Image (cartoon, rainbow, N blue to C red):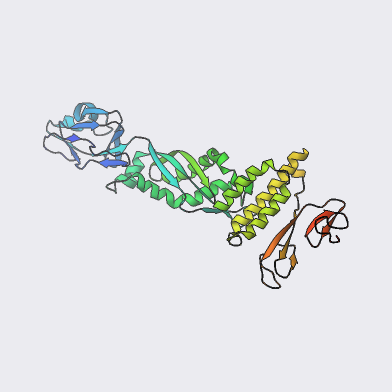
Amino acid sequence: MAWFTQGKDTIEWEEFRDDTLFFKWAAKEIKKGAKLIIRPGQKAIFFANGVIEGVFEKAGSYDIASEIVPFLSTLKGVFSLRGDTGMRAEVYFVNSKELLLPWGTRQRIMIPTPEVPSGIPVGCNGNLIVEFRDYQKFIEKVAGVKDTYSLEDISERIMGELNPVVAEAILGGQQSIGVNALIGLQQNSRKLGKAIKEELDKELSEFGFGVVDVNILSINYPDEVQQMAERVAGQSFVGNVGKYAAVQMADSFDSPNGGNNIAAMGAQIAMGAQMAQQMTGSMTGTPTSEQKPLSPMANFVCTECKFTSSTLTKFCPECGKPMKAMVAEPTTGTDKFCTACRKMVPGKFCPDCGAQTV
């Protein structure tokens, strides 16, 4: 404790900004006759001998000797010892407004699914609310060693941990999740936000902060996956989902980048198959889990030498020319295959070209 000559000071935080978290009053000696001014959205913390002496929250102007010192823990008797004395203490002002911080994954996170083990890229963004939880810890770890600390500093801290936190929240302790669950994350955004909040809260508690709430504003996927999700929604009005799934696979090979985006193609195939199971179950009234997935017939035929393959093939192994997908309708009990038209037709001869069927 040190003593100083009598004088008058005004202890206040004048240059107050919403994104700045604290301000440290420059002088360390508080003199007789000094005043304290607390503005709306601020709190004043008196700190001495390594401990917090008092926290004052109500906005207004206060006389230090008569209105502040009586409420301090160990310094209350200082001014009464001598009429011209002062006391040594640090005064910190903290931002008590709602601290709203935008966040977002810096790049998409690869989330594994049973259908695409390598992962489907997912990104998300939103905002979160931060608050002070432990002033003692904040002063020891931040305010006592830094001249300033802002929301941007918290943002940098969070962003470094965000991707693994979001991935863990999406997976929920599992190794992978289904494509349908992944595409439907927006519907469960509140639950996902709570899981992210718990992990970020632990991360910030080390510095005396806490996370009040996490809001997820959007979840995004690659364009190919997003378009497939929209097609799945629209396909709910179409009956032959098996043919739809096969046609979409064929379309992916005809597109310029069809063979390059493996994750998106895998998602399309998986979503088409799952959609077929679900819609078949709904049309027959039987639970989806008891239905066998539809098996659309699709052959890939070389445009040059007519080589045929029943597996996904983009270029002919015989001549190197492009392969084209030929989709056939599901077979019935009496249908036969036309080798010229490459499709199933009724009868011994094709009604479209007259060729004999097999």
Quarter that holds the N terminus: top left
Q: Which percent across, then down, holds residue 24?
A: 25, 42
State whether residue 160 is above or below residue 211.
below
- Whether residue 118 appears in this view of the structure is no
Q: Which residue lies furthest to the top in this view?
A: 66
Foreground residue among 315 and 147 = 315
Foreground residue among 220 and 76 = 220
201 relative to 343 in the view: left or right: left
Foreground residue among 247 and 41 = 247
Foreground residue among 246 and 149 = 246
Number of numbered tags placed on the structure image: 0
State whether residue 329 is above or below residue 70.
below
Q: Which percent across, then down, holds residue 304?
A: 70, 69
Picture quadrant of residue 252: bottom right
Q: Which percent across, then down, holds residue 223?
A: 55, 52
Q: Which residue is drawn at 61% across and 62% down?
A: 259
Q: Which percent across, then down, holds residue 141?
A: 34, 47
Quarter that holds the C terminus: bottom right
State whether residue 334 is above or below residue 55.
below
28 relative to 207 in the view: left or right: left
Q: Residue at x 56, y 47 (%)?
A: 170
- Whether residue 336 appears in this view of the structure is yes
Q: Which residue is drawn at 25% across and 27% down?
A: 60
